[in-house]
């Protein structure tokens, strides 16, 4: 039985330990706090000798490959403390406008993290989400909850970025591990913060009308060239280019009116017959004269006509367009709602 006594030896970083029976070798670490990030794989040669290692005993050896498994002992870190991002003012609501990433030396779930905007003057305009595959923070233009805002205060053409009003934003972004190992909490905090400055890029925009639609009235016996009303548009860009107005005469209705290209004043071009056509729907466009290919913006104009000698009932039965609704109003209600003109009876 003496020949069966076995001695195990290994090298350097691991300690041999022999089971009480003498037939089982257990490998243990020889160093404290081994670092997977510094070295992950080891190859260990193990030698076994019989006769308790005495002279004349036989020996055999084998190689054991050892891989260190990861623990969450490394916090995420942004490579830079300050970043800068360019976003054009034409970016659409909900669209992704940029990415940011913190590095984590750990692997697997130990490297998972979540990005959060913790403060900054752009926190109401931008949002950030986490791509679980790439572990990147995806910056987007925030969507607003339309159900909490009246429609007329939140038009479909809402643009969160406006170079002319605000040229830059600042965000403080945090990247934090989502799976913590409290055995290593003393190595934390397992999060990092960086500052992102967003530069809003100027985009040449078309002119904007002061109102999306206009309601105007004219007497049916008005002479050709009678002013009906005036529309106003402006260049929203910093250049504030001059604006010119015109009517696209695509329909017969459009040919009943002309517009002063400089002032936006609309005048009659034909004689009207209220009994034949009580109102007209025309489209006026505005363009920047500084552009080779002008940007255009249009506004709907509803021009109704009425007789000077008509009674109130006939007038009230006319279709009056206000905010794209047809209404039948009393004389006083109509004056209060429109607030743009008075009726002479």
Image (cartoon, rainbow, N blue to C red):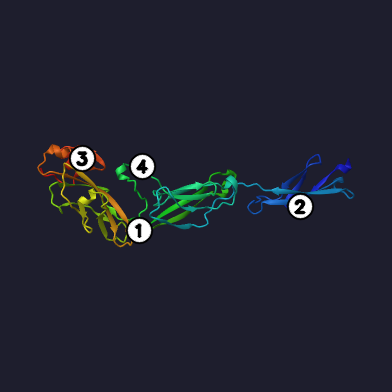
To which residue does mark 1 refer? 204
Residue 189 in view here: no
Mark positioned earlier in the residue sequence (3 or 1): 1
Q: Find the distance from the CA under tag 3 to the CA under tag 1.
A: 38 Å
Left or right position of 263 against 106 = left
Which quarter of the figure has residue 315?
top left
Q: Helix, strand, or loop for circle 2?
A: loop
Left or right position of 65 against 98 = right
Q: Residue at x 71, y 48 (%)?
A: 66
To which residue does mark 3 refer? 319
Query: How far across and down, in percent of the image, does residue 266 sit?
Result: 20, 53
Q: Find the distance from the CA under tag 3 to the CA under tag 4.
A: 30 Å
Q: Find the distance from the CA under tag 2 to the CA under tag 1.
A: 72 Å
| Dot 2 crowding, Cα within 10 Å, few <14, some 14–19, many 20+ | few
To which residue does mark 4 refer? 146
Q: Helix, strand, or loop for circle 3?
A: loop
Residue 147 in view here: yes
Mark positioned earlier in the residue sequence (4 or 1): 4
Query: How far across and down, in percent of the image, does residue 233 sit?
Result: 26, 54
């Amino acid at each position: 039985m003496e020949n069966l006594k076995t001695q195990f030896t290994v090298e350097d970083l691991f300690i041999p330990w022999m089971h009480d029976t003498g037939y089982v070798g257990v490998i243990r670490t020889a160093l404290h706090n081994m670092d997977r990030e510094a070295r992950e794989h080891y190859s260990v040669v193990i030698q076994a000798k019989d006769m308790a290692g005495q002279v004349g005993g036989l020996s055999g050896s084998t190689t054991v490959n050892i891989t260190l498994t990861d623990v969450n002992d490394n916090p995420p870190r942004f490579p830079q403390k300050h970043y800068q991002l360019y976003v054009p003012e034409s970016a659409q609501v909900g669209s992704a406008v940029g990415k940011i990433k913190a590095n984590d030396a750990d692997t697997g779930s130990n490297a998972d993290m979540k990005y959060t905007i913790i403060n900054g003057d752009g926190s109401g305009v931008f949002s950030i989400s986490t791509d679980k595959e790439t572990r990147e923070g995806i910056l987007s233009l925030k969507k607003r909850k339309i159900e909490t805002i009246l429609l007329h205060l939140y038009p479909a053409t809402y643009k969160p970025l406006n170079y002319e009003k605000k040229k830059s934003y600042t965000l403080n972004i945090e990247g934090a591990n989502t799976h913590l190992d409290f055995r290593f909490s003393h190595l934390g905090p397992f999060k990092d913060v960086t500052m992102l400055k967003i530069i809003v890029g100027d985009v040449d925009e078309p002119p904007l009308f002061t109102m999306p639609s206009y309601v105007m009235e004219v007497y049916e016996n008005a002479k050709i060239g009678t002013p009906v009303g005036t529309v106003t548009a402006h260049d929203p860009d910093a250049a504030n280019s001059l604006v010119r107005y015109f009517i696209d005469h695509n329909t017969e209705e459009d040919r009943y009116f002309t517009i002063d290209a400089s002032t936006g004043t609309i005048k009659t071009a034909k004689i009207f017959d209220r009994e034949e056509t009580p109102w007209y729907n025309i489209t006026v466009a505005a363009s920047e004269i500084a552009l080779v290919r002008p940007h255009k913006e249009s506004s709907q104009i509803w021009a109704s006509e009425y007789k000077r000698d008509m009674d109130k009932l006939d007038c009230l039965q006319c279709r009056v367009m206000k905010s794209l609704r047809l209404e039948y109003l009393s004389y006083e209600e109509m004056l209060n709602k429109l607030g743009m003109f008075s009726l002479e009876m």
